[in-house]
Every structure is written in C-alpha cells, then in structure tokens.
Amino acid sequence: MPTFAQLDAITLADLRATGATKWKREDGALGAFVAEMDYGVAQPIKDALHAAVEQGLFAYLPEHYRDQMQASVAAWLQRQSGWQVPRERIHEMPDVVAVYRAAMEHFTPPGGKIIVPTPSYMPFLSVPASVGREVIEVPMSVDSNGYHFTHVLAALERAFDTGGRLLVLCNPHNPTGRVFHRAELAAIEELVERKGGRVFADEIWSPLVFPGHQHISYAAMGAAAAGHTITATAASKAFNLPGLKCAQLITSNEADEEKWRAVGHFPMHGAANLGLVGTAAAFAECQPWLDDILAYLKRNRDLLTEFVAERMPHARVTRPEATYVAWLDLTDYALETDPQTFLLEQAGVMCTVGTACGRVGTGHVRFIFAMPKPLMLEALERMAQALEQVPVRA
C-alpha cells in the first residue's frame, strides 16, 4: 500500500515523464484541471492486466470478462450502500458520458430538455446539444457561511414545468463535493415522480467519500426512484483508470432493462476488454489501496481549505465531503480577466474555468487536489502570491 511519504516523494519531473494530460503543457503550468490522480494504480489491477495481456484476449469481449465485472460491481454496490443490483442489470459502457448520452437518447422523449443543477461537471452542460437537446441550468443554493451547496426544489420544479424531462443528479457532486443526505434525495424522488420525469444518476465518485459522510445510491431510495432512474458508475475516478474505457450503466426496473437489451448493443460496444478486467480487480481487490488514498486525499483537502482561509482571505472554497475536486470562488478579487486565465498567466497553475460549469461559475475555478502534497502546496502558494497583488472589490 502507498505511504504518505511515498506519495509526497512523487516529483514534478516524475509526473512530466508520464506524458499525462495534466503535466504535458509546454508552458510548464502545474496541472489542477483534469480530474485524475497522480498516485499510480493499485498492484492487483496491474497484476490482473498483465495476466489478461498474457492471455491475449483482444478480440471481441469474452463473456467471462463481463461476468467478472458484473459480479465485482454488484458486490461493491452491496458493500458500499446496501444496494442489491441483479448482476444482469449492470452493463459495460466506455465512460459515464456515454451513459449520459444513452439516458437522453433512449430513456427520454424526443426534444425533452435536460435539467442540470449548476455548477456542474462540464460535459453535462455541453453534451446535450450534440443529441439535439436543450439544457436548463438550475443554480444550486449556497450557504454563504459554510459554502455548502444544495438543490433548490422550487427551481427544479419550474424546470420540469418548462419542458425538462431528465434531471442530472451527480452524487457525490462534482464540482462542489457534496454527498447528499437521504432527506435531500427523498425530496428529489418525490418531485421527479410527481412530474413524470427521469433521473440520470452519476455516481462515479461514490467510492471517494470522506469519513463522516455516507453515499446513498439514488435508485435504491425506493420504488419510485428505481422506476425513473438510469445510474452510471465506474472505477475510473477512485482507482485512476479513465484510460481503460469502462463504466457501467445500471437499470433499476424491468421496463428499462428490457429497453436496454433492445437498444444497448452498439453503445456498449465501445467498452474495452482490459477496462472490464481492471474494473473487476479494482472493486474486488483494491479496497486497502483505496483506503490509503482516501486518507491522503483527506489530508490534502484539509490542508487546502486551511491554506485558502489563511492565505486567500477574500476567496471561498468548498470543503468537499467526497471527491478530489475543490470549487474556488474568486469573485471578490477585482481580476481584469477570467480567473483561469489569471492563474495560468500570473501563477503558472492551470485550473478549470468556472463558466464551463455553468453561468454561476463566473469568477470561479475548479481545482483538482489529487496531486502530491508538496506540489499542491506549491500550486496554492503561487496562486496566493498572485492574488495578493490584486485589489479587492469594494
């Protein structure tokens, strides 16, 4: 298992040598914009992939790879949140965005609008246009004291009333890090059911929940939620496997399962054999590795929030309950350009521009803190020094 000292010792040179997207920028910027970790991969995943390479099963998907993936994911869901999912309702997909597209195309009426609470993971706002769908942005409510985000039920209801058909429910939430409570989910379940809508439940971050919080699978809330939900999950965020191209589409009622068996062949076709192998190993064998990584991420989160409070006194940052994503509000600084451009040019740190997460993201950035602690602190120090030179709005 990786120790804190081993993860701290990963250098910028080590990361640049990987050629990873976060670290290959010609301008030399520190990468805090791609939601992946810099901590490598658990040994059981490597072992499973090496064994699969030795087998050489690179033709169309062997059935036993699917069986292993389904069994591993079903057992994980049962352990994690008590959700008992029949294995045959767990379907391989290339990634969560592919599940999102499938939910829109096959489980909502033509022209149905997509309701996206904001701030949001960027593709949830940009992808619907590619399938001819309009997005209704619904800003979340924020507690100014704790910088704590919640859904606004009245606004969601208005969105359904103006043509919304599919609600995007990202839980744990990217980019705010919320883990929604049972009462919050129950209120959404009642609203969606009353409006005859559907839910796309993105639960890709569910393995990365910090102590003191508990992820609840939305489709497991009750019969109503199960009847109107398509769930997406994957091992890619928690176990650092996005390049293996494997996620899961999960149906939670018989009608949706029957529909997917009729239309799902080609959407599923993009999943990679080795992705299923890696997924099976991750969920079945890598909990000890994940526990260590989660402890490291918690330390990074705590250091980040403390640093912002002390060194960026006019900024606000979320204290994520899950994920390794921080949402940073810089609207009180009188920047002459958007904060992403400012931080890149003046601090050499590349974040995600907040407006990519919705109109409410003006003046914000998304910061990925799943990097070695010394590099994270260097990035934050650069940002703080740059912001010290900026006047504060009156």
Image (spheres, grey):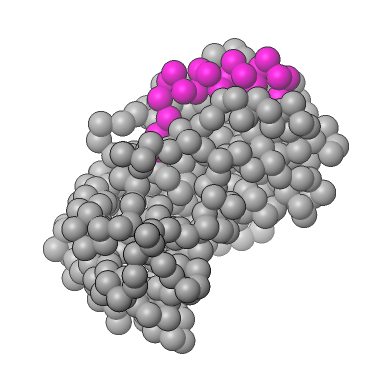
Q: Residue 217: image x %, image y %?
A: 48, 27
Q: Measured along the vertical axis of the image, is residue 298 above or below residue 219?
A: below
Q: Residue furthest left?
A: 5
Bounds of the magenta segment:
178-199
Quadrant of the rendering where the C terminus is positioned: bottom left
Nearest the viewer among 39 and 30 is 30
Q: Position of residue 42 (x, y in %)?
A: 32, 55
Seen in the picture, residue 219 relative to 303 is either above or below; the reply is above
Residue 211, located in which quarter of the rendered image?
Answer: top left
Decide if residue 30 is in sight here: no
Residue 49 left/right relative to 260: left
Residue under the point 31% across and 64% down: 371
Residue 180 covered by magenta stretch = yes
Question: Residue 57 location in percent, x, y?
Answer: 58, 57
Magenta stretch contains residue 26: no
Q: In the current view of this chain or complex, which residue is farthest to the front?
A: 394
Q: Nearer the viewer, residue 17 or 161?
A: 161
